[in-house]
Image (tube, helix red, strand yellow):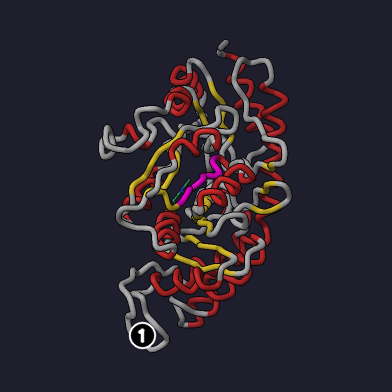
Amino acid sequence: MLLLCANPKAQYESHRDEIDAAIRRVLESGIFMSGGETAALEREFASYTGTSEAVAVSNGTDALELALAACSIGANDEVITVSHTAVATVAAVEHVGATAVLVDIDPDTYTIDPGVVAAAITPRTKAIVPVHLYGHPADMDALVSLAREHELRIIEDCAQAHGATWRGRRVGSMGDAACFSFYPTKNLGALGNGGMVVTHDADLAGQVRRVREYGWNERRESEQPGWNCRIDEIQAAILRTKLPHLDADNQKRSEIALTYDKTLAGTGLVLPRIREGATHVYHLYVVQASRRDELQAFLRQREIQTGIHYATPVHLHPAYRGRLAGGDNLPVTEHVASRVLSLPMYPELSSEQIIHVVDSIRELPM
Ligand SMILES: *Cc1c(COP(=O)(O)O)cnc(C)c1O
């Protein structure tokens, strides 16, 4: 039996009764869109992240797009972000008509390097989009002070970091707005698509709410152009049943990471590092290996699936190659892309499975 890298089915099975009951509740209510489940999820998720406003949307990419649009970011504006991320981060910036300006990452935490952000700021820069990659928060102190100094917005990409903290505050609560994905494999996953924008700014939340649905006012008149980015009630209900388990699930991920840390020490792999002041929620457990592809193929023979996040940085994908600002100067990004490997990581992973992964890695001297 193949040991999976991420396992949304195991997540479903461990919360099956509650999820089935939530789905049945929606089916019997007859309300499938824009109802009480969505509104309750928004309240509960705002409370969880320590923000005052939350707007549930169709997915994490749309969350980024709506947050950028609600901050009036569009044509002729520049947004500083990273290339070592999901394509979604950069795609969202381009979808609102803005220009993505890419900067390199910190080699220890794989998050945006604040030391190179200042040099990328121009008179057209409007925002920074830090990505809390793999579940590790970006260095928000440095970014917030840069943003204050240059009057920039910060829109956090929290798609991989539900529940992570930076100096005691949850990710999502430190920027002007923050975006989450509830794709099934994320730390808080739906059984389909979902996303959320959170903020402390009621006006900004109102703007996200309007553009989520055609720019409608209460009379369903479009006062401005908008999108259709609604979440459905079944996904909202499923997420409400899973949210109370998120901290315990993240705790299990941390325990698994600790076991990997201890048992993989001395193998020659570069293990995850945590910046002081941060808590990591291990959406992914990512190591670096000099013979990464060989290790991945070897583990595959041992029935162990691994992932590569990301084999190709965004600026080297065919759609973007050669045309993204900053793409000619990302040495750390390009170096780690050839070395990173994501080991199996999900809350239901058993001790025996972890031992199997570690023993298999130890069979191939690195
Ligand atoms: C998953 C992800 C997204 C996009 O979320 P979707 O719900 O798949 O649209 C954006 N950014 C990052 C870093 C992600 O991992």
Image quarter for residue 202? bottom right
Neighbourhood count class around disc 1 (C-alpha, 10 Å): few under 14, some 14–19, many 20 upward: few
Please state if 262 lies on the left or on the right of 74 as rendered. Answer: right
Asked whether the viewer can see residue 155, the reply is no
Residue found at x 60% / y 22% = 270
Residue 338 versus residue 347 in the image, above or below:
above
Q: What element carries label 1?
A: loop
Residue 279 versus residue 297 in the image, above or below:
below
Image location (x, y in percent) of residue 234: 49, 69
Asked if the stretch drawn in magenta spans residue 355, the answer is: no
Image location (x, y in percent) of residue 197: 51, 62
Image location (x, y in percent) of residue 71: 44, 62
Q: Mark 1 points at which residue?
A: 220
Please state if 17 lies on the left or on the right of 119 as rendered. Answer: right
Asked if the stretch drawn in magenta spans residue 130, the answer is: yes
Seen from the viewer's position, the closer of residues 61 and 257 is 61
